[in-house]
Image (tube, helix red, strand yellow):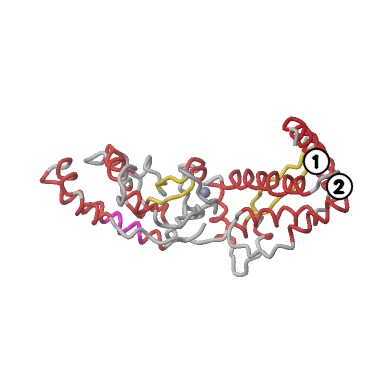
Amino acid sequence: MRKINKPEFSLENIFEDKKKYFRGKLNTDTEKDFLEGLLLQEELYFRYGEDKKLYNMKETSSDDCEIDLIEAYKYLYRKDIKQAYRSRLYDIGGDRCPVCDSSYGYGTCELDHILPKSKYHQLSIMPINLVKICKSCNRGKSDSVGDSKVGILSPYFNDYNTQCFTKLNIDIINDKVKIIVKIKSFDEVNISNLDINSYEKIKYNILQHRIIETLTNRAMSVYNSSIEDVICNICKDKISKKELILNLKSFQEERYEANYIDECFFRQKIIETILNSSNKEVLIENILIHINEKIEKNKIIKKQFYNDFNV
Ligand SMILES: [Zn+2]
């Protein structure tokens, strides 16, 4: 989870901008109290956010609320308006998901209610409770917010490097290379000053967003497209075990400073894990068979292509 800038607008700005909207929904006698109540909630949210205690926010349902704030959320944060609240939140955090580091493709980011609107109705329209994250983190995320031992964290207040807390496991399953991303145990995490409580909190947040599944899919796709396929395209004829290892090592020579869990990071980690595995011989043997099969297939396809087009 990477810390990103906080929204530059607050509930107060929204109430000011949309006076008419709220007036139309609220009773004149209670309007002031209602809006002030929400502003107090926002103040509390900031305090708990800074203290890593967001789980302390009180749950409320729509029954306790004068207006339907989910409806208000849909109206205030609707997609079709440029320069409006949604796009102002979308401008924060750059082009990578602050939770899992995936870069956003077209239409792959969404607004997430950090504390879920299903349990915290009063926070439905609060900018500081809304963050742009990727679709898979948003959809994979559970509604639990934890407790004082392991509570929910927010990219507006918290920062940890997911790379340091995850590892790759490479195995052969059903004759195919299978890469699985796992969470490191406390003893495996190499961060000085990390205490067990902080470790448990971070682990909870990684599991809460189901990042492990997302990263496993990404690692597998990097292996297929950016390692296997590249070697197959470079090599015109079947290769030997020695050539395969040389090809794998050639990826390692790229200078890489790991900042994000991106394609390059996975490539380096996958090769490193294969070459240092206690199961290295079996892994290499299997990869070799698979790659040579692909090279042969490519040759047939190319030959067919040249025949068909008389090149
Ligand atoms: Zn994500």
Q: Is residue 42 magenta?
A: yes
Secondary element at tag 1: helix
- As drawn, 232 above or below 309: below
Give the residue displayed 46% in from the left and 49% down from the top. Answer: 133
Indicate the position of residue 142 as horizontal and vertical percent values. Answer: 49, 42
Residue 54 x %, y %: 41, 54
Q: Position of residue 111 (x, y in %)?
A: 40, 46
Residue annotated with mark 1 = 295
In this image, 109 relative to 217: left or right? left
Q: Nearer the viewer, residue 100 or 264?
A: 264
The residue under the point 70% across, 44% down is: 224
Q: Amino acid at mark 1?
A: Ile
Q: Main secondary structure of the magenta part?
A: helix
Q: Quadrant of the C terminus?
A: top right
Q: Label 2 is placed on what type of residue?
A: Ile
Q: Where is residue 223 shown, x and y percent of the image?
A: 70, 47
For the record, the magenta segment spans 40-46
Asked whether, in this view, residue 3 is left or right of residue 263, the answer is left
